[in-house]
Amino acid sequence: MGGVPSGRVHNLINVAAYSVLAGGVLLASAQNVVAVSPTQAVYFSLAYAAGTFLLSPDLDLAEGHVNSKRYWGVLGFLWAPYGMIFSHRGISHTWVVGPLTRLAYLAIMVGIGVGLISLVFPGVRLPTFPQTLNVAELWPALWPLLLGYYLSQWLHLMADGVRPDHGMRHSMRKIRKRF
Ligand SMILES: [Zn+2]
């Protein structure tokens, strides 16, 4: 026993860290040390919760039964290909690219879903993606989302004992093996 924390333990760690952080931010904003708008707090919290419960790095096990797949309910099977593509604790468990792989996978799934819906129900009007994205305009909403998501992911990796240079060492080992 021991070693890698289970999904339940990861959730507990993330919820505990969130409570401490939220308490700290509340205290700091009461003292006017930091200024966080209620909207930013909501964005951060939603992204943090999504990263903890719905987009956990352990979805790399989604070809089998894993806690983080369960939260998707009937849609859990959609993550099975992700589990097949990514080996457990490989690229999925790197600090920068790992969290991006799950966002990209999610975007592809949503794209396929939207495509299918408009194919089956041509009359349905689906919300469209804005034609122009102004990052400067989106930034006040974007940074709390990114911070919340990445923080939830990094806590998972820290609990797993994965170091920030995991990806690099992983690929260096591969390169060295080749020569
Ligand atoms: Zn893990």
Image (cartoon, rainbow, N blue to C red):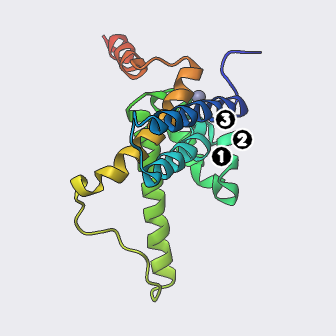
Q: Nearer the viewer, mark 1 or mark 3?
A: 3
Q: Residues within 10 Å of mark 3 (few under 14, many from 20)?
A: many
Q: Is residue 75 above or below residue 92?
A: below
Observer-side mark, 2 or 1, equals: 1
Dot 1 or dot 3, earlier in sequence: 3
| Residue located beneath label 2 in the image | 65
If the image is split into quadrants, where does the N terminus sit? Answer: top right
Report whether the residue tagged 1 is closer than 8 Å to ligand 1.
no
Q: Which residue is mark 3?
A: 11
Q: Is mark 2 within 8 Å of ligand 1?
A: no
Neighbourhood count class around disc 1 (C-alpha, 10 Å): few under 14, some 14–19, many 20 upward: many
Disc 3 residue: CB within 8 Å of ligand 1 = no
User: How dense is the environment of label 2, judged by Cα within 10 Å: few (below 14), some, or many (20 and up)?
Assistant: few
Q: Determine whether the residue tagged by mark 1 lies in a helix, strand or loop.
A: helix
Q: Determine the residue positioned at 35% across, 50% down.
A: 142
Q: Residue at x 44, y 71 (%)?
A: 115
Dot 2 or dot 3, earlier in sequence: 3
State the image coordinates of residue 98 (x, y, percent, origin top left).
44, 34
Q: Is residue 15 left or right of residue 140?
A: right
Do tag 2 and tag 1 residues touch (Cβ < 8 Å)?
yes
CA–CA distance between discs 2 and 1?
7 Å
Mark 1 is on which residue type? Answer: Lys
Q: Which quadrant of the figure shows ligand 1?
A: top right
Q: Secondary structure at mark 2?
A: loop
Q: Amino acid at mark 2?
A: His
Residue 86 visible in the snapshot? no
Q: Which residue is mark 1?
A: 69
Tell me the kind of residue under disc 3.
Asn
